[in-house]
Each structure stands twice: as structure tokens, then as C-alpha cells.
Amino acid sequence: MALLRTEDVTKTFGALTAVNRVTLAVEEGTLHSIIGPNGAGKTTLFNLLTGQAPPTSGRILFDGRDITGTPPQRIAHLGIARSFQRTNVFPALSVLDNVWVAVFARSRRRGLGWRPADRYPDLTERALAALGEVGLGDNARRAARELSHGEQRQLELAIALAAAPRLLLLDEPAAGLSPDETRKMVALVRGLKGRYTIVLIEHKMDIIMTISDRVSVMHFGSLIAEGTPAEIQRHAEVRRAYLGGIVAP
Ligand SMILES: Nc1ncnc2c1ncn2[C@@H]1O[C@H](COP(=O)(O)OP(=O)(O)O)[C@@H](O)[C@H]1O
Ligand SMILES: [Mg+2]
């Protein structure tokens, strides 16, 4: 069964149809990529999946349950986590505390008081484990602002993982990274593959083609193709969309 399913999901902003009748199924345990030029509606689709905005029409089903119009906090508790296209960490907090806050929020425990981390050693363990997963275990005590840009993206990933998500949504995790940092991030995501169900937005074709189980292609809000990486590479309409000068293949 698909872990995530959208049925004819549409989002309009005034006269603009940012997401146009998108029907998508993400199978449990797979890495499913969404590619498409800037403005294709990829991030908007994520906003709909996480409840940041309600769809104008259509349905979203997570694990068979209709979550259309469910508020973001509830969707997070159901097990959908995301990382953002832009870095979204608290610069003044330590690396550990950035993750700890996410673990605490997910735990539904109350009573944030003086030195709460010391009161919940199990949560601290989980936060440290998430940092270990992204290779930031040795940086736990540093302030987040001292991390390089690439490390901040890794931290974002740790924050998403700390919630023990059933579905992980990654929005251009390699955006703005140097070639070295990009390689590291791709290796990280590859390491998560199989252990998490992942939807990855990316527009670097070389990354997509080596890492994905399935690829969906968005163009002007609509899905124009879906298939394995090899099928997508052969797909005539995709080639036209990409070779038509909109974005380099
Ligand atoms: N909150 C919003 N209000 C109005 N237009 C929006 C809003 N969010 C996104 N858009 C528009 O929707 C289209 C799709 O944007 P987006 O989903 O960010 O594309 P992508 O992530 O594929 O680059 C763009 O034309 C963008 O300007
Ligand atoms: Mg985007």
C-alpha cells in the first residue's frame, strides 16, 4: 500500500494554479523524487502535504487516513517531517539544543523549565542519536551559527530525523552547497534510503538519477511523467520540458 497518496490535489493563488490536479502515490520504504523547473509547484506541494496550506481541492491520504486540511502540528505528530529549501535552524542555540527542541515537541511532554535537557536524558539520547546519523555527533555543543552552511543543512536533516518520521520530505537538501558538501549530503540521503520513506525535491538531474527509486516530474503545476530514473531519462515530454531552455538537464 502507498504510505502517501494525493488525489487530484490542486492549489491556486488567485489566478495562478501552482499545483494542478496532482495524483501521486509514494510506496512505503522508497525514495521518490520530484523534479521540475523553478516555479513548477514542488515546494507548494510539500506545503500541502505538511498542512502549511490547505489544498484548494483534492484529497491527501497518509497511511490510508484522510489528512486533507489537518493542521501542521497534527500532521507532524502523525509522522510527516520535512526539511526546508532554506536553512531553518536557531543560530544562537547549540547544535544539540536545536535537535532537542524538536525531540521534546514530538514527545508531547510538558514542563519546559530550568535546564529541561537534564530532566529528560532519554530525549537527549535521541537527539544525540539523530546528530550521529547525520555525522554531527562531535559538534553537539557548538552554537548552530558556527556551523558551515553544509553542516547547517545536515543539522536540519537531524531535526527532521529526530521526530522519528514515517515520511521524510526533503526540499532541495543540497541547495546552495559546494560540490564537496553536495557529495556529502547525497551520501547522507543515500544512507537513509530504505530506512525511511523519503520524498526528495531536487533539480540536479545527476543526483536524482542515481539515488531515486521513482521519479515524478512537475511542470507548471502538473505532473507530466512518472517512472523509474531510466524511464524518465527516455521520456520524450520530459526531455522537451528540460531541453526547451527552462532548465539544464
Ligand atoms: N504563498 C504564495 N502566494 C502566491 N504565489 C505563490 C505562493 N507560494 C508559491 N507561489 C507561486 O506558486 C508557483 C510555484 O512555486 P513553488 O511551489 O515554490 O515552486 P518550486 O518549488 O517548484 O520552485 C510559483 O509561481 C510561485 O511564485
Ligand atoms: Mg521550491
Image (tube, grey):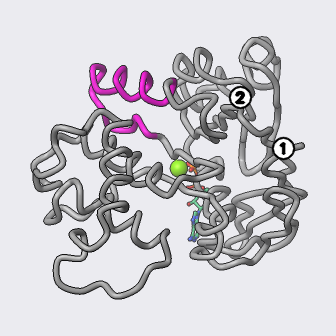
Quarter of the picture containing the N terminus is top right
**Which x, y percent locates residue 151?**
24, 39
Q: Residue at coordinates 73% horizontally, 51% vertically from top-left?
A: 221
Query: Is 189 a magenta residue?
Result: yes
116 up-or-down from 96: above or below = below
Q: Amino acid at mark 2?
A: Ala
Residue bounds of the magenta highlight: 173-190
**Which x, y percent locates residue 241?**
71, 29
Q: How many marks?
A: 2
**Which x, y percent locates residue 76?**
59, 67
Nearer to us in this view, 234 or 144: 144
Q: Amino acid at mark 1?
A: Ala
Which corner quadrant of the image does residue 242 belong to?
Answer: top right
Which corner quadrant of the image does residue 194 belong to?
Answer: top right
Cβ(mark 1) to ligand 1 < 8 Å? no
Return the disc, 1 or 2, that comes first in the chain's sequence.
Answer: 1
Dot 1 corresponds to which residue? Answer: 25
Q: Residue at coordinates 42% horizontally, 28% vertically from top-left?
A: 188
